[in-house]
Amino acid sequence: SSRVETLEFQAEARALLRLMVHSIYSDKDVFLRELISNASDALDKLRIAALVDQSLREDAEDPHIDIEVDRDSRTLTIRDNGIGMSREDVVGLIGTIARSGTAELLRKLRESADAAASADLIGQFGVGFYATFMVADTVTLVTRKAGEPGGTRWESSGEGTYVIKDVDDVPHGTAVTVHLKPEDAEDRLFDYTDEYKIREIVKKYSDFIAWPIRMAVERPAPATAGEETDGADGGASGDGADTAAGAAATVTEIETLNSMKALWARPRDEVEAAEYNELYRHLSHDWTDPLEVIQMKGEGTFEYEALLFIPSRAPLDLYTRDAKRGVQLYVKRVFIMADCEALLPNYLRFVKGVVDARDLSLNISREILQQDRRIQQVRRRLVRKVLAAVANLRENEPEKYRTFWTEFGAAVKEGLLEDTENEKAILDIVSVASTRDPEQTTTLREYVERMKDGQTEIYYLTGDSRATIENSPHMEAFAARGYEVLILTDPVDEVWVERVGRVDDHPLKSIAKGQVDLDSDDERKDAEAERDEQRKEFAELLTWMTERLKDEVKEVRLSSRLTTSPACVVGDTFDMTPALEKMYRAMGQ
Ligand code: ADP
Ligand code: MG
């Protein structure tokens, strides 16, 4: 009747679990952070649901997270009174990994032989709930979805299957019980049931969590034994049961372990870098530290505070359609929505963070946000601030800028198609490869500064890879004459150079298209005379070749751009380049 089932984890989930059980990640403390983070998300979700559904109001009162320790049975339980899960939710959310990029992660993991690199990859991906299996023999999860009658119990040792069944009389929300592995007690200086250890982890990783994280702690009893105690937050209960005769009496009190302070509201110089890093991890589900923290404040008619993070690594799904985007929206310290797309354009989808606004309705919908003029203004400021922060990295922290560009450059270049308003600012931070130095990229302005006397155009060539471009016959004359050519290999490059057309007064010019004049005036006159000669000499041959090849090419002509190759195919100035043709064909046009 209680529908007991033993089910298999989805293949990808199994592979990740195996890595957790054999714990290649050294920092095991993070399991607690992941559980608290999930509990906090569940409380956020219930609060939002209760705004819409009256019947959930009561369940949403007094949100909190409790940590319960049982030293004798060596268990740790993290309990929240949040949204909870239905049986289907548990199968779908805990038994499988729905996140995109999982397949990609596993493929990379299989390729990478050494453990450190694997741990690194896991760090980049984040393993969430499964992190519990680094410290646990068995994990039990009991949950009931708010507003639904029946509860669900889930249990697994992380070895391929789990057991799930219906249970009655469960409060709404979720309790995760971690049955600690025995070796943690033997090999270590501490144990995860130690009060000080739990305090330390919560302080380190979860201090900013907006809901109280509570735990029963033992305190020395006040002076006179047997006297009634005044609990600090009303949850105190006198308890002298395990006090041996003669020893100092203790009382058990419920203590809130985290400060719940909103970091975005605190002055920058009062916040430790480590605190920002933890908030970032909670927001992004990324285990690495952010590359840059941006704090800003809007005053006047529409007040807000914002804290943005530029990650140091691109998520695996950055270029897939279902990539998460947007920052979290709060209204007066209250969480309103995750992934608020209205606040940042698509090309900055990798930026994480929080925007806390003063004068918005708590019930505001995504659709209304998209149209709200004040939100559009905030968005404009956030964009400018992010672009300025990157420009600043380029100027002052070139190493960080390089990391940024390697990870997010291709996404930022999409901005040249979407965001004409900020074209200048984006062009300012674009870096591209060039023929000048195989190791170093160049900004467009640096290229312009190096242009040869008399050169007015910025030369570029697009292609699949640096090697194809370098070996292209189009390159010969330019290389021979010492002209620098930009090497563009991202698919989006083809499109933005067309769309942007020029940088300041300098047209962007594909060396694969139309006529390119490389000589000075005098040289050109001489060359012109010489070419006239040659044209007469080869006239018959050229006519014959044009005739023979008329289905393939428009015209066969003599060229001055080759030095070693006998011939090359060029496009008309207004023709599509081969790569662009390929892209349009792939798009079905
Ligand atoms: P993530 O938090 O990155 O989505 P997790 O592995 O930590 O990944 O959790 C997977 C999913 O399981 C969550 O997205 C959430 O839907 C669900 N979940 C986990 N813990 C809880 C909880 N305490 N209450 C409600 N749902 C939860
Ligand atoms: Mg999680």
Image (spheres, helix red, strand yellow):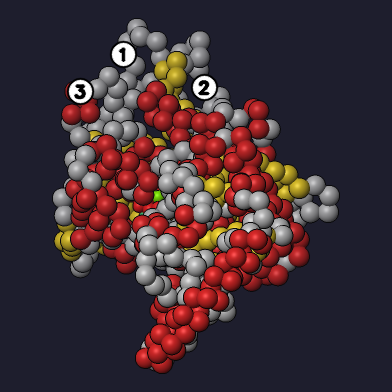
Viewer-side label of 2, 1? 1
Is 303 on the left or on the right of 348, as rendered?
right
Is 521 on the left or on the right of 189, as rendered?
right
**Circle nearer the N terminus (3, 1):** 3
Q: Position of residue 18 (x, y in %)?
A: 19, 48
**Circle nearer the N terminus (3, 2):** 3
Q: Assign a secondary structure to mark 3.
A: loop
Q: Residue at x 36, y 57 (%)?
A: 467
Is 422 on the left or on the right of 146, as rendered?
right
Q: Nearer the viewer, residue 216 or 123?
A: 123
Which residue is disc 3 drawn over?
187
Tell me whether the residue at label 3 lies in contact with that at label 1, contact meaning CB atoms closer than 8 angstroms. Answer: no
Write down the quadrant of residue 120 in the picture: top left
> Callout 3 environment at 10 Å: few (<14), some (14 to 19), or many (20+)?
few
Viewer-side label of 3, 1? 3
Q: Position of residue 139 (x, y in %)?
A: 25, 46
Q: Residue at x 27, y 19 (%)?
A: 189
The amino acid on which the numbered mark 2 sits, given as a three-letter code, is Glu
Q: Assign a secondary structure to mark 2.
A: loop
Give the CA separation, mark 3 to mark 1. 30 Å
Which residue is disc 1 drawn over?
244
